[in-house]
Amino acid sequence: MKEIISNLNKNFESRVRMGIMSVLMVNDYVDFNTLKELLDITDGNLSSHISALEKNNLIKVTKQFIGKKPNTRYEATNQGRKAFKEHLDYLDRLLKSQKEQ
Amino acid sequence: MKSEQLENLNEIRNLMEKSSRFLSLSGLSGVSAGIIALVGAAVAFFYLDFDQRYFDINRYFYNGMHQRLQQQIGFLVLDAVIVLLMALSAGVYFTTRKAKRKNLQVWDNTAKRMLVNLFIPLTAGGIFCLILLYHHVFFLVAPATLIFYGLSLLNASKYTLPDIRYLGICEIVLGLAGSFFVGYGLIIWAIGFGVLHIVYGTAMYMKYEREMVVNK
């Protein structure tokens, strides 16, 4: 039991980070505003979580211009996908083991 | 701990679906498209003097139907285009309404992605049918529209309500049957675009939207 919990990835502890990762798992890329609307959080909150994920190489940030408007897209790195999948598997096992008790 | 993690997992599932599929597609748009298609089929039926063996391959070749068909084809194409435009507007109307009720954005990336994937095979099919008209192969036009429409739905089903897949498969089967047993163009059109849409739309409305209205 202890061992399972220690395997939980600290990077995904917050609900916002889990949310960002789940959206990026099923989309090739997503821009800032779409993420903001989906997760229903403020700009500041979202960008602080994004930079934390980026710092750990879990997501990739691409800045570009559409016309004159700056547009930032996010995508999950392979490392991020793998880590998030493992995280979900652990959660799954955790729930199952608790069910058995 | 447990309920919190369960809630997290549910939220993840919800976010994955909401961000990757266009969920505002309304069942009522299917029903309205079906009704409009049936009316359009009835108009064509009256215009052809109740001749439901329209596009009959034997008469087409041997009994001078060819000449007459060529004159009629203009009216039938016009009829089909009007049906298509009316069905599309009704679809947009009901879908916008459902999105507003669910507080979702209508025009977002999921909508764009769904439409792009719907229209690639559909456009190919449309061009192919124009080519059939150009070569005067009239009897295959109706089944071909159904086959391509079914393939388009199948393709779009990955980006919207997954149930639309079964509607697509039914349209493909109907189109293939119609290409084999030629001469029933108008009837298979009425079944494929009319009856199937109404059945599918009603089923979707019952499954996804009824409780929403009741809850209001």
Image: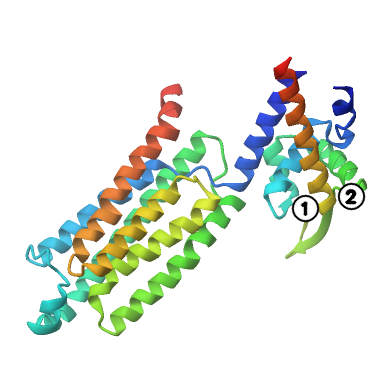
Going 35% across and 81% down the picture, which residue do you hit?
Answer: B131
Cα distance, mark 2 to mark 1?
A: 11 Å
- Residue A7 located left or right of residue A39: right
Q: Nearer the viewer, residue B128 or A88?
A: A88
Q: Is residue A77 visible?
A: no
> Chain under label 2?
A
- Residue B144 located left or right of residue A71: left
- Residue B139 located left or right of residue B13: left
Residue B1 place in picture, x, y as percent: 78, 18
Query: Picture quarter containing residue A90?
Result: top right
- Which three-letter amino acid code belongs to the residue tagged 1? Glu
Residue lying at the far top of the rendered structure: A101
- Which three-letter amino acid code belongs to the residue tagged 2? Asn
- Give the residue at mark 1: A75
Going 56% across and 35% down the picture, which residue do you hit?
Answer: B103
Q: Residues within 10 Å of mark 1 (few under 14, many from 20)?
A: many
Residue B20 place in picture, x, y as percent: 62, 47
